[in-house]
Image (spheres, rainbow, N blue to C red):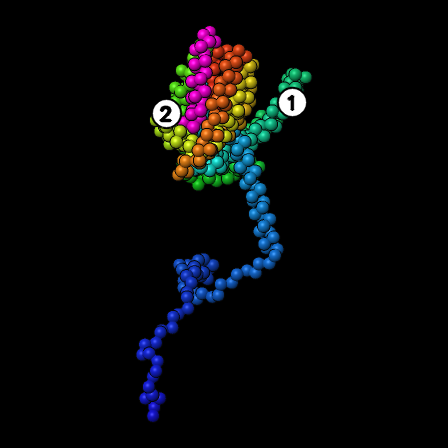
Amino acid sequence: MKPDAFHNPLPSVLPVAQPEPQAVLPAEDANGRFQPAAVLPAGPILRPHRNWSYFAADFVLRIAEGIYWSIVWVFGFLSLMGGLAILAVIPVVQFLTLGYLLEAGGRVARTGKPWYGLPGVWKAAHVGGIFLSVYLWLLPLRLLSDLAISAQIIDPGGPVALRWKVAQIIVTVLVVIHIVAAIARGGKMRYFLWPFNVIWLLRQIARGGYYRQARDAVYDFVVSLRLPYYFWLGVRGFAGAFLWLVIPVSLLAIGRVVGPVGFVGGFLLAVVLMYLPFLQIRFAAQNRWKAMFEVSAIREDFKRAPWCFLIALTITLTFALPLYLLKFEMIPREAAWLPSLVFVAFIYPARVLTGWAVGIAEHRPRRAHWFFRWTGFVPMPVLTLFFVFLLFFTQYAAWEGVWSLYEQHAFLLPVPFMGM
């Protein structure tokens, strides 16, 4: 019997053997140029052998990278604080500083995460790096200028003075060209150390289209700063706080002449201070003007996180008191940014902490126990009354007199730090 005659116990349809997977790779011709993709057989995936030295090097690189970015973040934070302090002494532009502080607290309130309260820190590191690099490159010019002036004083019109003047002009032109080329390339600090940025810039100009790219990049960066948003937020935050403060502070100021009126104003101001920090943060978090006057919502938030509200109010009032010491003497205009730096350093953490308290309350579904609510509420009027008591006597020591009562650092603009 032929083998075909035997009964086949296997199924009639056998699985067809699948071909080996193929890999699509670019092929190379005889001239070494890549041709359109060709189908080549895929071989086994070979992975490099990684010994302990590889992992040690990777660990060291990760540590170095972490240290580098930590330094950049700290530098950006310092640049941001310095920039806010400088903006705080410029009339009208001060609203940018107030708007940023409100936005920082509002972001923390929306997310409940304090580390979200530093918007724009990486952009500040970039801008601060440009300013620092330009300042360092201008130091040799200042030195040459001093030497040229000294030579001119010693020997007016002499050959030595002429040589120093020529050297000053040449170095100034070279430094200015280098600074412009470094900023045109991106403005990173490493570009200020690279001496061939001019060659790169000339190549980009020769290729064409560089002006359009640079213009769009600068425009996108400026738009990303959101300056109109911060300004408008600061204006509305200032207006809302002023509406809350103007009547109690005015009555407190009248109390300098009519004592009973001052007591009424002080009591009203103490009540307002228990709500105003949280109302401003609620307004910044929701970006709604009506939120500045929703007292019942703040009461409900307090019942969810009473101790957090107490801590935030304590820090806000405590950090506002040292700023009144700067009002006892007029600050020169050229040094006005130094006290403003103190203002930013004290008010910024208070805003973030207030946003943290509001954020915790907004994310908690239930009210706290009555014990925590009462123990969190009782100290609050005591704190505000004590703050108002100290505030009343600052008008007798401050340079502006009774007008200093209207300069509430914790809620309004840092106007008292400018010597008019």
Q: Mark 2: which secondary structure?
A: helix
- Is 5 magenta? The answer is no
Looking at the picture, does residue 175 appear above or below residue 158?
below
Q: Residue at x 34, y 90 (%)?
A: 2
Q: Estimate the x, y position of residue 275 in percent, counting from the top left.
A: 42, 25
Q: Residue at x 39, y 22 (%)?
A: 240
Marking on residue 293: 2
Left or right: where does residue 320 sit relative to residue 35? right
Q: Quadrant of residue 72?
A: top right
239 and 139: which is toward the camera: 239
Marking on residue 57: none
Classify the position of the N terminus by image quarter: bottom left
The residue sitting at the front extreme is: 371
Q: Amino acid at mark 1?
A: Leu
Residue assigned mark 1: 147
Q: Quadrant of residue 253?
A: top left
What span is in magenta? Answer: 256-279
Q: Mark 1: which secondary structure?
A: helix
Give the crowd class for mark 2: few <14, some 14-19, many >=20 residues within 10 Å.
some
